[in-house]
Amino acid sequence: MTHDRDTFYLADEHDHEAGGSTMLGFWIYLMSDCLIFAMLFACYGLYGGSYAGGPSPAEIFELPLVAVNTTMLLLSSITYGFAMLAMEEGRKTNTLVWLAITGLFGLCFIGIELYEFSALIHEGATPQRSAFLSSFFTLVGTHGLHVTLGLVWLVTLMAQVGRFGLTVANKRRLMCLSLFWHFLDVIWIGVFTFVYLLGVLR
C-alpha cells in the first residue's frame, strides 16, 4: 500500500486561544523582572548596613510619608481592579474613569517618591555617600522607574480604548498591564517592609 508524499505527514493542529502567546510572553517578562528585583533586594540586604560613617535608615526615613506613599499605590491597585470589572461588563466610560483615577494615584506615588529623593539629596544623603544609600536609591529608583513606565503604558491604553473601544486586543493589553501593576504593588510591599520598616528598627 502506497501513500502520497504530500499527505503522508499530517500536522496535528489544535485550536489556540487568541492572544495566548502574548500572555505567555508577558508572564516570562514578569519572571525576568522578578529576578532583577531579587538581585536588587539581595544587594540591599548585603550592603544595607554599610553606612560608611553616614546616616542610617532610622535617621533619614520618614515612615509617615512612606506610609502615605504606600497607600497611594495600594489604592491604585484597587481602582485598577474596578477598571477591570468595568471592562468585563463592557462599560467603556467607566473603564476609562477608573483607569484615570489609577493614573492619578500613580502620579501621586511618583511625586512623593521624587520629593523623598530630593529631600535626601538636599540633606547630603546621596547615592555616593555609602553602600547603604547606593543600594537604597538603586532599588527604590528602579521600582519608581517601573511605575513611571506603567503610567506611560496606562495613558497609551486609555487613548486606544477611547478611540477603538474595548476590543479583544485592548482587553488583552489591559490584562497585561493589570498583571504588571499588581506586580509592582507586591514589590513595593516588600520594599516598604524590608527597606523602610526593618531599616528603622535596626
Image (cartoon, rainbow, N blue to C red):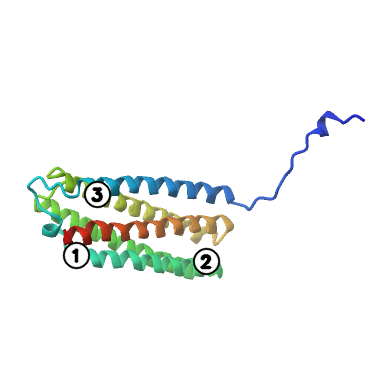
Residue occupying image coordinates x 14% and y 56%:
119
Can you tell which of label 1 and label 3 is closer to the viewer? 3
Q: Which mark is residue 63?
A: 1
Q: Secondary structure at mark 3?
A: helix
Give the residue furthest to the left: 53
Q: Secondary structure at mark 1?
A: helix
Q: Which mark is residue 134?
A: none
Can you tell which of label 2 and label 3 is closer to the viewer? 3
Amino acid carrying label 1: it is: Leu
Q: State if disc 3 and disc 2 touch (CB < 8 Å).
A: no
Residue occupying image coordinates x 31% and y 52%:
143
Q: CA distance from mark 2 to mark 1?
A: 36 Å
Amino acid carrying label 3: it is: Gly
Amino acid carrying label 2: it is: Met
Q: Secondary structure at mark 2?
A: helix
Q: CA distance from mark 1 to mark 3?
A: 19 Å
Q: CA distance from mark 2 to mark 3?
A: 40 Å
Look at mark 3 in the image and give the residue it sits on.
Answer: 45
Residue occupying image coordinates x 10% and y 45%:
52
Look at mark 2 in the image and give the residue it sits on.
Answer: 87
Above or below residue 22? Residue 61 is below
